[in-house]
């Protein structure tokens, strides 16, 4: 055991883990938990048995609030079959003032514990009416908790439930993190203000002598994400892309605009190693991330589809007052592609105008209206010209279309390379579905795109 009664001279020669060292041992610990402990986090007592250190000393190592000797760090590293190197520790000059510390039983090295005093809920929406999404939640948990992905994107059309799903995930996973931060990007604050707000959300005194430059603040945020296992949710990042299109036309000076800094922020959070997870929701794919997402990458993408028939019925009929045959229910939910927002709007109309009778609503064949149309129109306008053209072409086909049939069009729609790129983009946004060899549009999207085709 480590002798805690050291001389003052000995303490002055102590060190603390560097950001790299902390990330290294946390990753090794999680790998060990996954391989040796059935994926369950080690308890404080189990960590003590592995390292030969008492809980108080382990707290010093992982919290980095008190110096320890190199022998202590070597014991921790060797317990997980990794080697302590000079870049894994440093003198603690960077500690400005007293850092916040955790209680031993809720310390950084036991991320299964709940630390409610450090949970920052921000603007997390209500999930009272949440239903379904069992498969999607399981997939996201696998990526975030067990595979330790540092960037996870959830994409899909407006109203499909991306924010709703992210909020449910936060509710289920918040006790796996020391800190949860939720930020909506529906309105983009100045980048300096945004970064400062994020940094000051962390329990450490990371904001002491905060850098003045945007680049410096971004680097400090990355340090924070290495020190604290944080779930950072950025909701609605498509606003960054929309702002870039609008501002790039008006910006003629050499100053880097805020939207460009936001893009650099997202790119860096996905590229640099850290112990946290950044969860992003978007209606548009981020071009900087297009080629770095994959099964072997720490960056993943979930393309969110609509609710199943049963889950859609559960969502629509919580009061049990809607009337319709099984076929009526199937027609209603399939028409809107299981989109929760579209279904809620339609259900309100059915209650208000059609005496809660689904068949009366369906018989008039006017199901594309109001906010449903506005949502589709907003997303359509965000597409590129080739994407709009191909979507409208698919809408005009009486039957689902194969890839070869797209190539056989006369005159050709567009170049082969463009067709491939456009199909990948539309599929990545869940605007088209692949069923076997065929590309399929949801009926509501088909009706919208058919109407738009005459305007192109």
Image: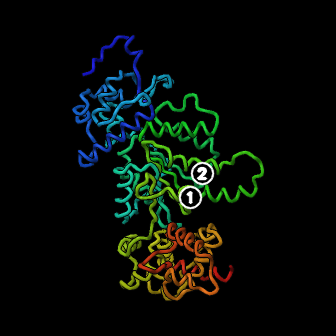
> Is residue 206 in view from this perspective?
yes
Q: Nearer the viewer, residue 198 or 407?
A: 407
Q: Earlier in the sequence, mark 2 or mark 1?
A: 2
Q: Nearer the viewer, residue 260 or 366?
A: 260
Instruction: Give how far across and how far down residue 51 sits, in percent.
Output: 26, 31
- Contact between marks 2 and 1 (CB within 8 A): the answer is yes
Tell me the distance, in whole angstroms, between the alpha carbons under discs 2 and 1: 8 Å
Q: From this viewpoint, which residue is outermost toward the right?
A: 252
- Within 10 Å of disc 1 (Cα), the crowding (few <14, some 14-19, many 20+) is some
Instruction: Give how far across and how far down residue 23 sits, in percent.
Output: 41, 38
Element type at mark 2: helix
**Residue wearing tag 1:** 286
Q: Quadrant of residue 238?
A: bottom right
- Give the number of the disc on residue 28: none
Q: Quadrant of residue 210?
A: top right
Identified at 54% across, 32% down, the residue is 207
Element type at mark 1: loop
**Residue wearing tag 2:** 263
Image quarter where the C terminus lies is bottom right
> Is residue 347 in view from this perspective?
no
Image quarter where the N terminus lies is top left
Q: Is residue 169 left or right of residue 52?
A: right
Identified at 38% across, 54% down, the residue is 143
Instruction: Give how far across and how far down residue 380 sits, in percent.
Output: 61, 71
């Amino acid at each position: 055991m480590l002798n805690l009664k050291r001389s003052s001279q000995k303490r002055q020669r102590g060190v603390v883990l560097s950001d790299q060292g902390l990330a290294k041992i946390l990753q090794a610990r999680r790998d060990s938990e996954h391989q040796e402990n059935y994926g369950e986090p080690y308890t404080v007592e189990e960590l003590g048995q592995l390292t030969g250190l008492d809980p108080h000393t382990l707290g010093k190592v992982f919290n980095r609030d008190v110096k320890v000797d190199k022998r202590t760090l070597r014991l921790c590293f060797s317990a997980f079959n990794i080697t302590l190197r000079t870049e894994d520790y440093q003198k603690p000059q960077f500690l400005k003032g007293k850092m916040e510390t955790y209680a031993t039983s809720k310390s950084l090295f036991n991320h299964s514990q709940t630390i409610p005093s450090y949970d920052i809920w921000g603007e997390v929406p209500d999930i009272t009416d949440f239903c379904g999404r069992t498969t999607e939640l399981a997939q996201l948990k696998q990526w975030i908790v067990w595979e330790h992905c540092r960037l996870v994107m959830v994409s899909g059309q407006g109203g499909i439930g991306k924010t709703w799903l992210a909020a449910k995930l936060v509710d289920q996973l918040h006790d796996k993190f020391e800190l949860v931060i939720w930020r909506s990007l529906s309105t983009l604050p100045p980048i300096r203000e945004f970064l400062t707000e994020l940094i000051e959300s962390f329990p450490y005194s990371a904001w002491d002598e905060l850098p003045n430059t945007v680049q410096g603040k971004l680097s400090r945020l990355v340090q924070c994400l290495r020190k604290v296992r944080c779930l950072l949710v950025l909701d609605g990042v498509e606003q960054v892309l929309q702002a870039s299109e609008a501002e790039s036309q008006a910006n003629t000076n050499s100053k880097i605009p805020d939207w460009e800094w936001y893009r650099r922020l997202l790119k860096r959070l996905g590229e640099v190693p850290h112990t946290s997870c950044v969860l992003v929701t978007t209606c548009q794919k981020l071009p900087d991330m297009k080629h770095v997402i994959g099964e072997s990458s720490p960056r993943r993408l979930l393309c969110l589809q609509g609710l199943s028939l049963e889950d859609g019925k559960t969502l629509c009929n919580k009061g049990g007052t809607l009337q319709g045959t099984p076929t009526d229910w199937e027609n209603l939910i399939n028409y809107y592609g299981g989109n929760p927002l579209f279904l809620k709007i339609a259900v309100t109309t059915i209650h208000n105008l059609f005496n809660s009778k689904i068949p009366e609503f369906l018989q008039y064949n006017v199901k594309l209206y109001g906010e449903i149309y506005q949502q589709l129109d907003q997303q359509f306008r965000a597409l590129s010209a080739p994407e709009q053209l191909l979507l409208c072409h698919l809408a005009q086909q009486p039957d689902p279309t194969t890839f070869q049939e797209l190539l056989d069009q006369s005159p050709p729609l567009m170049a082969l390379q463009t067709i491939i790129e456009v199909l990948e983009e539309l599929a990545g946004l869940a605007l088209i579905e692949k069923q076997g060899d065929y590309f399929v549009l949801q009926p509501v999207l088909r009706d919208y795109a058919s109407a738009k085709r005459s305007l192109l």
